[in-house]
Image (spheres, rainbow, N blue to C red):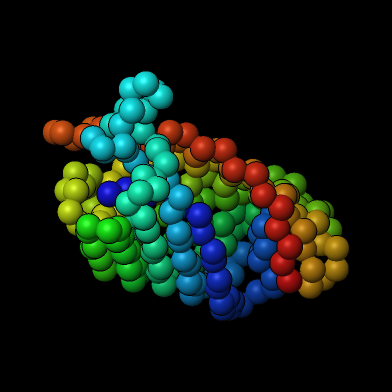
Amino acid sequence: MRKICKSLVFGVLFAFPGIAFAGGFVSEPGSVFVKSGFQSWTADKVFAGVKEANPDKGIKVGDAADYDPTNKGEFTSQNISISASYVPIERLAFDFFLPVLQISKFKDLSFESESVGFGDLYLGAGYQVLKFSEVGTTVNLKVKVPTAPPNEDQVSIPLSTGQFDYMLEQQTSWAVKPALHLTLRTLYRYRDSVEGETLTFNFRDEFELGLEVGG
C-alpha cells in the first residue's frame, strides 16, 4: 500500500564551525552541519490496486487514485531524521539525509497495519554558481537510494518506495538581513517506475516550486 503524501517538517540545526548555511548560500570551506529533524505525512491519494483501478476513468493498477470514501482509509507516517552537509572547498557542498526511525500506519474499516524501521536515503552535491554578499544561487544534484526492494505485499506497509529518484534543484537566496533569508526553490524529480511480478507502480515525474523564509 503506497501512498501519495503531504508533509510537515521540523528541524534543529547544529553547525561547527562556520557561518549560516541557507538555501543558495554555501558556507566556508571546512564547515560541517548536522541536523536532526521530525517529519509527518498524511496521504490524500493511493496507488491504485485492483479495487481502485477504473479503466473508464483511465486509472490503471499502479496509477495515482483517490481513496474510496466508503472505506474511510487513513495513512499517516512520521520519522526522525539525521542529515549532514560538508563543504570541502569553496562553493561546493555534499549532503545526505536519512530517516533513522520511521513509523508508517494505515487503517480503514476492515484493515490495519503498521511498519517501523529506516526510510529511504538521499545523497546530494551542490555548487554555488552565483555568489554576492546578499544573493546566492546553488544548483544541486540529488539521488534517492531505496533502503528496501520493491514491495508487492498488500498486507504490510512499506517504509521504502523501492525505487531510485534523480533530482535537479536550484535555490536562490536573498539575505534581506543577516539573520533573515528569502529563498526561491525549484526542483525537477525523475522517478523510476517499479515493475514487479504482479504490480507495476507508476510514480511519475514531479516539478516543485517553493518560496521559503528562514532565519
| Residue at the farthest left position | 197
**Count of numbered tags:** 0
Question: Which quadrant would residue 90 be assigned to in this image?
Answer: bottom right
Asked whether residue 51 appears in the rendered view, the answer is: yes
Q: In which quarter of the view is residue 42 placed? A: bottom left
Percent position (x, y) of residue 101? 34, 71
Please say whether residue 25 is visible from this viewpoint.
no
Q: Nearer the viewer, residue 168 or 192?
A: 192
Q: Front-most of 92 and 178?
A: 178
Q: Judge left or right: residue 186 versus residue 146.
A: right
Task: Say left or right for 131 vs 45.
Answer: right
- Residue depicted at x 27% and y 58%: 109
- Figure check: 163 above or below 104: above
Q: Position of residue 103 (x, y in %)?
A: 33, 68
User: From the viewer's perspective, is 202 left or right of 110?
Assistant: right
Residue 98 lies, in percent from the top left, at 39, 63
Query: Foreground: 182 or 109?
Result: 109
Q: Which residue is pictured at 24% across the width and 62% down the height?
A: 112
Check the image and report above or below for 67 versus 132. Answer: above
Residue at 49 percent of width and 72 percent of height: 37
The quadrant the C terminus occupies is bottom right
Q: Residue furthest front?
A: 70
- In the figure, residue 23 lies in which quadrant? bottom right
Q: Is residue 143 above or below residue 91?
A: above
At x 54% / y 64%, what residue is drawn? 8
Q: Nearer the viewer, residue 173 or 128?
A: 173
Could you tell me residue 198's position as x and y percent?
15, 33
